[in-house]
Amino acid sequence: MQKSKKAAIWSRMPILVIALAAIFGAIYLRDFASLDSLGLYHAQLSDLVALHPVMAAAGFVVVYFCVVAFSLPGATVATLTGGFLFGLFPGVVYNVMGASLGAIAIFVAARSGFGADIAKRLSTSGGPVKSLIDALHGNQWSALLTMRLVPAIPFFLANLVPAFVGVGLVPFAVTTVAGIIPAAIIFTAAGAGIDQILAEGGALTLDRIASPDLVWPLFGLGALSALPMVIKGLKRK
């Protein structure tokens, strides 16, 4: 009995650490992980990449991994930074690696901890989360891919909910990588143009870097990925 209690406590430690890190990041790191900081330190970062390209690339992937794995603020800024520092290619590769590995890490941590208890509570809560859970149970691959492609669903929620409802690691990992790629290409390409914006002067803003029109294709892809769920629902009716 004692061993089972200790095992239960240790299994919940990873997600507790992530929760504490997320709270710390929301309080102390929000201002640092901003476009203003990128504009302030862009010269130093560029020099670092020029002097130590391999170390800079490895360090960037590790930082991006930590941002996602610990639910820290600044994931969008990190993607733009990848494009700014490394260009569209290999910047998009580094962005996808960091984001995917971080998402898989938080998924595994969440699944090993409070997953069963939270799944039960979410299932009885109703609302959009309940609908998302039903979709995951009904058409797992399509629902997972839609969550990744549609920007309306927060990234951290798309990492946690599948873990809480018992989604397998392989479907989660495959759809995470595949679903991250389109947005990564768009925002990495936008980040690659930051040099020109800085040369023109003025503050960095998301409106100047990435036009809202660029995001609409993601909604189109999300709609296509959701089509199997719609067809399945119509067949049931």
Image: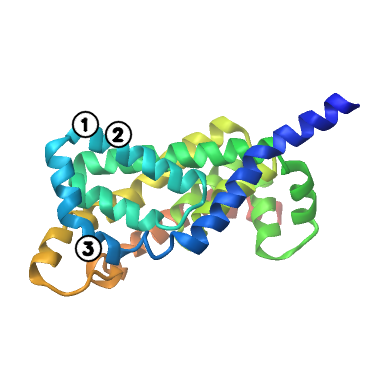
Q: Position of residue 48 (x, y in %)?
A: 17, 43
Question: 10 Å neighbourhood of mark 2: few (<14), some, or many (≥20)?
Answer: few
Q: Which colour assignment does the render follow?
A: rainbow
- Specify which label sits upstream in the sequence, 3 or 1: 3
Query: What is the quadrant of the N terminus in the image?
Result: top right
User: Please, is residue 18 above or below residue 130 in the view?
Assistant: above
Callout count: 3
Q: Amino acid at mark 1?
A: Val
**Secondary element at tag 2:** helix
- Specify which label sits upstream in the sequence, 2 or 3: 3
Question: 10 Å neighbourhood of mark 1: few (<14), some, or many (≥20)?
Answer: few
Q: Position of residue 193 (x, y in %)?
A: 16, 58
Query: What is the quadrant of the C terminus in the image?
Result: bottom right
Q: Residue most toward the right? A: 1
Any mark on residue 40, and which? Answer: 3
Instruction: Please say if the residues under marks 1 and 2 sit with CB atoms less than 8 Å apart.
Output: yes
Residue on which the image places disc 1: 54
Q: Disc 2 versus disc 3: distance between alpha carbons?
A: 22 Å
Instruction: Please say if the residues under marks 2 and 3 sit with CB atoms less than 8 Å apart.
Output: no
Q: Nearer the viewer, residue 212 or 36?
A: 36
Residue on which the image places disc 2: 58
Any mark on residue 62, and which? Answer: none
**Secondary element at tag 3:** helix
Residue at the (72%, 42%) spot, across then down: 115
Q: Amino acid at mark 3?
A: Leu
Q: Amino acid at mark 2?
A: Ala
178 lies left or right of 214: right
Q: Nearer the viewer, residue 63 or 155?
A: 63
